[in-house]
Image (spheres, helix red, strand yellow):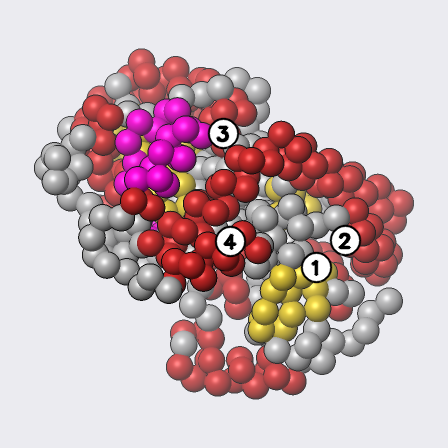
Amino acid sequence: MTRGLSRARSAEWFRRAVAVIPGGVNSPVRAFRAVGGEPLFIRSARGAYLEDVDGNRFIDYVGSWGPMILGHAHPEVVRAVEEAVRKGVSYGAPTSLEVEMAEEIGEALPSIEKVRMTSSGTEATMSAIRLARAFTGRRKVVKFEGCYHGHADALLVRAGSGVATLGLPDSPGVLPDVAAQTLVLPFNDERALEQAFEAHGADIACVIIEPIVGNMGCVLPKPGFLSKVRELTERRGALLIFDEVITGFRVGYHGAQGLYGIRPDLTCLGKIVGGGLPVGAFGGRSEIMRWLAPEGPVYHAGTLAGNPLAMAAGLATLRVLKRERETLYPRLERLTTRLAEGIAAEAERCGVPVRVNHIASMLTIFFTDRAVTDWASAATTDRERFRRFFHALLERGIYWPPSPFETAFVSAAHEEAEIEATLEAVREAMRALA
Ligand code: KE4
């Protein structure tokens, strides 16, 4: 049953926000533009639940867009941050916490022999591309349509007219000749990648990919696709960059690279490795990483890179994941599968065409009758139906990602009770869509 959310305080905060913050938010997806209506202002969160400024409680499937795999305010993370903050929050000097973080990351992801911390995923991918260009002496970057790697200019590029044609700016302010150095290909399209290498191979510095895509909604690599990307980049002397900002420590303790047995040359991380505080990271083979200043000539820096508070939150998170990995990840998979299959069954019962893509604790509902394997098929989702579905869930206490092209996340704090409550809300929401 819907309960008519009280939104007075959120509305008041949003009115004040839009007066002083562009769009009233510090990141566009939070503004509910894809689903309509005004965003809710969150006061606090604990476990699998959010509470907004009007006192409404929600089962949370955004999880801060990925970091909160343990759920909100996990006691071990809270304690680690409390202890760290009493020692001061930032020194601008090396700390043992950064060494421990680098060791933890390298142990979980053996392809990362050396790693640099940043303060966001954007900085991680931006720096990884600069490093790849310097290391190879080449200029071009290959990315895939529907993959998002943060907002560095080289990556805010949309596809040109053909797979071998140069990219076009995907935002005002990105210069055409910057965009022209980026090729944008269809995800899961081996032939397109071969054509790109045939046309530009000697000048392709790197291929950057979300090995499991979260940013067109959850889209899985077709069997053999990632191996093909690895083989082609290897053979043509381009670096393979796995953007695991979402999938790192999300789809397993060893990330997507562990799941698929692919060893990328560089990996970008973020979200979970910061436990919800501002963190990104990029790392890989020592022979590449030694090109970074001050050891090598490629510049990368950051006032708060490796910040002790962020390291404390990230280390506490990784240590819980490492300690509980044998049971935690299978349980997340079980709960997520129950949810995904339950949603598909409810839609089927109501005659609403959906495809629910899911893996580990990631899932996305596409309102389409086509298999969703790339941006073109993801874009067939019925956005109006998604909008109505989103609000029907919100009214019933379920906080789903406010965009049809994002991934929902199940956390370790979700129990069977939350999944069943969500499916009850889905049942009612689907009936309203039929
Ligand atoms: P940040 O700069 O937002 O920390 O990370 C950029 C980034 C890089 N790579 C991947 C695969 C990512 O998913 C992201 C950021 N993800 C988005 C939404 N999925 C964050 C939400 C937002 O932009 O507010």
Q: Residue at x 55, y 39 (%)?
A: 321
Residue 308 vs residue 305, the one in the foreground: 308
Q: Earlier in the sequence, mark 2 or mark 1?
A: 1
Badge 1 crowding class, 10 Å Cα cut-off, few under 14, some 14 to 19, many 20 or more, is: many
Q: Find numbered disc 2 in the image and state the secondary structure of the residue it sits on.
A: helix
Cα gap from disc 4 to disc 1, whole angstroms: 20 Å
State yes or no: residue 117 in magenta. Answer: yes
Q: Identify the amino acid type marked 3.
A: His
Based on the displayed image, in which of its 4 quarters is residue 161 positioned?
A: top left
Q: Which residue is mark 1?
A: 59
Please determine whether, in this image, residue 296 is positioned above or below residue 198. Answer: below
**Range of the magenta residues?**
99-122
Badge 4 crowding class, 10 Å Cα cut-off, few under 14, some 14 to 19, many 20 or more, is: many
Q: Find numbered disc 4 in the image and state the secondary structure of the residue it sits on.
A: helix
Residue 280 vs residue 390, the one in the foreground: 280
Q: Identify the amino acid type marked 4.
A: Val
**Can you give x and y, in whole percent of width and height, for residue 226 in the image?**
47, 23
For residue 418, which numbered disc appears in the image? 2
Q: Which residue is mark 4?
A: 77
Give the position of the N terminus as an image quadrant.
bottom right
Q: Are marks 2 and 1 in contact (CB under 8 Å)?
A: yes
